[in-house]
């Protein structure tokens, strides 16, 4: 097994090696810059939350300090609950090697205002960004095919979302509680399945911009026809 070694910048910094599918996984935390760096190859582990204050990820003791998260090239999947409760994180960098974002991966990253999801990502698992109260806008890249349920639930500051052309399915309650949502753009020519994705506190009169050749299809699609202001992308 080949593991990539990192030098701890600060003597109190922890480093943990984990074997996932026979590949190395490493993390380092630099308190001087409040930066958490994830490196290695393959999938990150899945973690858990005890329902109160503790996450099982090994950087839990630093989670209320972390401001920057860097997921380096080589990581292919962000694990469940991986960065849950990182309440001061404002800058998250995700490498182009990542294809999956795990369930509740960024749960309660309450200071996060924006994030760039790379074009390598194809699948976003359930509730990945739930309770990101400061997240104002998001672009789901064209590479993504599935957005599972609750992904952006209770992102109460969300104003704008762009859904990429490759998305075919948007899960239930994906935008639950997104009461400030003011604009949706969907680039998919065929309306994605979106059963109850906009089920609570989403204004159905907000503009929904879709490809010009697909306006009529969206207006009659079971999961989109409740929107009253579907327009062609100009």
Image: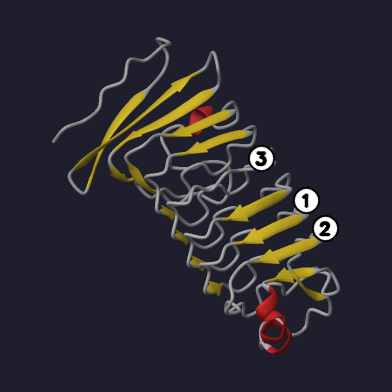
Which residue does the image show at 32% across and 15% down from the upper left?
Answer: 7
Q: Earlier in the sequence, mark 3 or mark 1?
A: 3
Q: Residue furthest left?
A: 1
Residue 112 marker: 3
Local SS, label 1: loop
Which residue does the image show at 54% across and 44% down from the upper left?
Answer: 84
Q: Which quarter shows the N terminus?
A: top left
Say if mark 2 contacts mark 1, CB within 8 Å.
Answer: yes
What x and y, as percent, mark residue 10? 43, 11
Residue 157 marker: 1
Local SS, label 3: loop
Figure colour scheme? secondary structure
Task: Quickly name the residue at label 2.
Answer: 180
Q: Earlier in the sequence, mark 2 or mark 1?
A: 1
From this view, report whether residue 185 is shown above or below residue 66.
below
What x and y, as percent, mark residue 86? 58, 37
């Amino acid at each position: 097994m080949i593991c990539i070694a990192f030098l701890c910048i600060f003597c109190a910094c922890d480093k943990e090696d984990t074997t996932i599918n026979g590949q190395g996984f490493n993390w380092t935390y630099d308190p001087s810059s409040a930066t958490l760096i994830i490196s290695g190859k393959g999938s990150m582990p899945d973690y858990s939350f005890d329902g109160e204050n503790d996450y099982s990820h090994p950087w839990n003791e630093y989670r209320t300090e972390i401001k920057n998260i860097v997921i380096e090239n080589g990581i292919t999947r962000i694990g469940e609950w991986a960065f849950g409760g990182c309440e001061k994180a404002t800058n998250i960098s995700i490498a182009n090697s990542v294809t999956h974002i795990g369930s509740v991966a960024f749960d309660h990253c309450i200071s996060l205002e924006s994030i760039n999801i790379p074009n390598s990502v194809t699948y976003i698992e359930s509730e990945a960004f739930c309770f990101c109260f400061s997240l104002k806008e998001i672009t789901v890249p064209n590479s993504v095919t599935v957005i599972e349920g609750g992904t952006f639930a209770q992102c109460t500051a969300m104003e704008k979302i762009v859904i990429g052309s490759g998305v075919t399915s948007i899960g239930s309650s994906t935008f639950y509680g997104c009461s400030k949502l003011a604009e949706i753009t969907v680039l998919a020519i065929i309306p994605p399945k979106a059963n109850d994705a906009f089920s609570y506190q989403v204004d159905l009169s907000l503009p929904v911009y879709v490809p010009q050749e697909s306006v009529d299809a969206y207006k009659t699609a079971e999961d989109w026809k409740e929107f009253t202001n579907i327009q062609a992308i100009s």
